[in-house]
Image: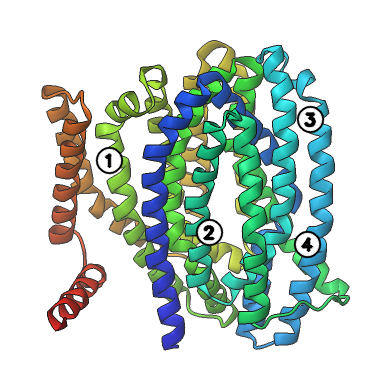
Amino acid sequence: MIKKRNELRSGVYLSYLNLAISSVIPFVYTPVMLRILGQAEYGLYSLSNSVVGYLSLLSFGFGGTVVRYLAKYRAEEKSDEVEKTYGFFLILYGILAVVVMIGGVLLSRNVEGIFDKGLLPNEISKMKILVLIMAFNMAMSFPISVFSSVAIAHERYFFRKIMDIVSTVAAPLANLIALYLGYASVGIALAGTVVQLLMAPVSMMYCTRVLKVKPKFVRISKTLVREMLGFSVFVFIGSLVDMLFWATDKVILGMLASSTAVAIYNVGGTFNNMVMSVSTSISSVFTPRITGMVVTNQAKDDLSALMIRIGRIQFYIVALVVSGFTVFGKTFINLWAGVEYKDAYWITIMTLFPMCIPLIQNIAKSIVIAQNKHQFRSIVYLIIAIINVISTYIVVPYTGIIGAAFCSCISYLVGQGLIMNIYYYKITGLDIPLFWKNILKLSIIPGAIMMLGLLLKRICPIEHWLSFFVGVMIYVIIYCLTMYIFAMNDYEKDIIRKPIIKLCKVCKFK
């Protein structure tokens, strides 16, 4: 138990170290990349990435299934079933990798027919190459992901997060080398492939030699396969929904607008990805524990308490980032990416605020999946996502990127905000009123600080990096102090106090 607790704690700490690294690196890397590539080529690279992203749907939602069933069998102490499941998914993902490559070839051959209205002839030629390289990269990631799932299911967060950190650092370094050698977007795509090829053997050896888990390539029962498919189909729908929300907007802009419009929209989405990383870095390490709680029929009050406890912690960080971006985001984008990307601020604002709802409720999503009650969620999200795609396709020719962002905003509020909270409360049995009572109380301070920040920034505009960093530091200090003193409970304060006390004791001892 102590070892598991230490692994969990290490996983959370390393998640935030990785989060810090992955937040700092783009500050340095992205402006360099934008200036070397140029707005049009950056948009082309982003568009290619979005198009190839559809091939990830060929995993059919089995990613979450691997972790769920491995964690389930571990909780039930069925080691033989763990090894059979491991072997089954290695074979399955190997087959799917081949299918992904075939899909990549087909996409590459049809680029011209899809994007002839939005892209120039030379952009279409380069996009064909990018799609092929990215498809190969994704095909490799399929079997590699099984090794990661094994580590997560065994609650070995330290290794998993170390690998994440190495990847976070290695990928942009490889990209910069490719850019300075003059290979542009094609070089970046190839660099990602090289990084994956180097890291794959490490994950495989860890599962075999450290975890001592060896795959058994034997037939598993048809009943179990049907059960897994029944579980995965709705996870697949959830993945499809994410793709429709995050990739399709850029694809539609590439079809009906231009690569430049895709570039601006993608810069706005970059900040959303950062906030998503903030939230999921906490909730992801609780997935095996939640599965164990559900399998052992833990009380719903315990699940609600866990959701509220983790949701509050997620809120502190998400609220800091979101309110801070609202105050300083426009200045940051102008200084960081350039004035030509100024519309990215409004893209971020319109998608970031409604996205906060599912981000602080990630634990609820994990609970629903563990209970195998995610079918309704997936169907609702799919309907909302399809409506979002249709409305985006209609409004983009008239309103461009702003219209695309607005459609996503409304979809998130209705689907992930209103409908799913009713479902969590009525069907899943989570205490949603108590959850939002906690969150609304916590929202008062960030809201007040944000409004004050906007007012002061209007009086004293920020136009240089020095004044920007000074303003951000003051904002963060005020936010952290006020939240610590007036909002945090004893449990949350201990998360901050205890590591500081231990560090002080160590320093004093030395």
Of badges 2 and 3, nearer the viewer stands 3
Q: Earlier along the polypeptide chain: callout 3 or callout 4?
A: 3
Of badges 1 and 4, nearer the viewer stands 1
Q: Which mark is residue 323?
A: 1
Q: Quadrant of residue 308?
A: bottom left
Q: Residues within 10 Å of mark 2 (few under 14, many from 20)?
A: many
Distance Cα–Cα, label 2 vs label 1: 24 Å
Q: Amino acid at mark 4?
A: Leu
Q: Residue at x 16, y 23 (%)?
A: 461
Q: Residues within 10 Å of mark 1 (few under 14, many from 20)?
A: many
Of badges 1 and 3, nearer the viewer stands 3
Q: Residues within 10 Å of mark 3 (few under 14, many from 20)?
A: many
Q: Earlier along the polypeptide chain: callout 2 or callout 1?
A: 1
Residue 150, compared with residue 478, is above or below; it is below
Q: Which residue is mark 4?
A: 229
Please say whether residue 49 is visible from this viewpoint: yes
Distance Cα–Cα, label 4 vs label 2: 19 Å
Of badges 3 and 4, nearer the viewer stands 3
Q: Nearer the viewer, residue 145 or 210?
A: 210
Q: Position of residue 201 (x, y in %)?
A: 67, 65
Distance Cα–Cα, label 1 vs label 3: 41 Å
Q: Residue at x 67, y 12 (%)?
A: 120
What is the secondary structure assignment of the residue under circle 3? helix
Q: Which mark is residue 108?
A: 3
- Quadrant holding the C terminus: bottom left
Q: Nearer the viewer, residue 436 or 169?
A: 169
Q: Earlier along the polypeptide chain: callout 1 or callout 3?
A: 3
Q: Earlier along the polypeptide chain: callout 1 or callout 4?
A: 4
Q: Which residue is mark 2?
A: 365
Q: Residue at x 41, y 40 (%)?
A: 26
Q: Position of residue 450 (x, y in %)?
A: 21, 38
